[in-house]
Image: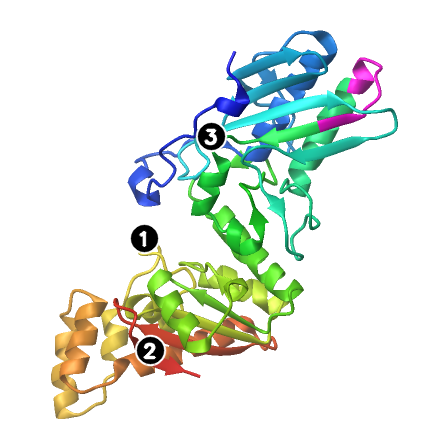
Amino acid sequence: MNDPASAPPDPTFSTPADARRPEGAHRRGWTTGACATAATKAALTALISGQFPDPVTIRLPRGEEPAFALAIEILSDGFASAGIVKDAGDDPDVTHGATVVATVRRLPEGAGIRFVAGDGVGTVTKAGLPIGVGEPAINPVPRAMMQAEVKALCREHDVPADIEITIAIPGGQKIAENTWNPRLGILGGLSVLGTTGVVHPFSCSAWIHSIHRGIDVARAEGLTHVLGATGSTSEKAARDFHGLPDGALLDMGDFAGGLLKYLRVHPVPRLTIAGGFAKLTKLAQGALDLHSGRSQVDMDFLAGLIPQTADGQALKNRIQSANTAMEVLELASESKFDIAHIIAGKARQTALDTLRGAPVEVDIIVTDRKGQILAHAP
């Protein structure tokens, strides 16, 4: 059997999302929470009965009952460990291929069920998350799933449900460097996540969830100004411009709608949105999902921003024939027309319209590809 402490990390966690997108129907997968629950059930079954169920079946919150094959089985005096290799289906999940290991031990009677962060699972260090400071980063729904399986097994075998559950994801500390955990104050590894147990490919729910948690942490820390940027270049430019701390940085990416709609209900006094000209043109057009596959730059919209003059008409014609937003920006610059400031203002109006009167002041920063600020709408 494999030793969970020595299991090697999977080397393929930084695969770009679009590179892994398959054609045709997408295969769904399982969350780390579902894998941790199945591993816990298998380990506890072995601890009680001496035999590992393989595959092991669990019940998910919506009633589904998937079966999981075991990659690790260890039974020793006083503890048992089981491991499951996470299959995220066709979703570009950074934890796809990681091994989720559960180790269970009996506790003194009356101790209840206790969770421990093992190798590669983070610990919460900031308020504002659904788990308290100092706790293992195992979210409420996965905890409830594991508790339900433990209690059911203990009832079945007439033993007290006083169990310590240690969840490990070997290599998880390295994988977590490609997540938002460090900014959220989750240190030492990954979070055990999932609300349904199922990963729906390209649903983007995990990304939007992280945006929401970032806002929660910022509010809990009393921050009054947060920054959502479409990428690292614009984030650095806006961060330096405003002198913002790490805790104020929200990984908005393409999900302006996910950011703004959450702030509408959970406001922070001030929001800066930063991005390149093309992304913020989409926001100016009214798009809230800025991904290239789900919204496009409208050349007619950009041409409509040009004044109705003889010179303006020539520029309009050139813009309508342009291939990219970058080309439009260059054409406008050659004609001494500051189109970036108009885009910044219109993007700000889209943000304000989406906030629907929530007490959030908004400014917009438009940058070029080198991180130079082209426009600021305060």
Q: Tell me, yes or no, whether the two marked residues, 2 and 1, touch with CB atoms within 8 Å.
A: no
Residue found farthest to the right: 110
Residue 70 appears in the figure: no
Between tags 1 and 3, which lies in front?
3
Tell me residue 328's x, y (percent): 19, 73
Callout 1: helix, strand or loop? loop
**Residue of label 2:** 343
Q: Which residues are magenta?
A: 154-164
Magenta-span inclusion, residue 155 = yes
> Which residue type does callout 1 highlight?
Gly
**Residue of label 1:** 293
**Residue of label 3:** 98
Mark 1 / mark 3, whichever is N-terminal? 3
Residue 78 appears in the figure: yes
> Which residue type does callout 3 highlight?
Ala
Residue 261 sits above or below residue 19 on the image:
below
Callout 3: helix, strand or loop? loop
Magenta-span inclusion, residue 310 = no
Tell me residue 136's x, y (percent): 65, 41
Identify the residue at horizontal 53%, vertical 24% (top origin).
Answer: 5
Mark 2 / mark 1, whichever is N-terminal? 1
Identify the residue at horizontal 67%, vertical 57% (top origin).
Answer: 127
Q: 2 left or right of 135?
A: left
Tell me residue 67's x, y (percent): 56, 19
Q: CA distance from mark 2 to mark 1?
A: 21 Å
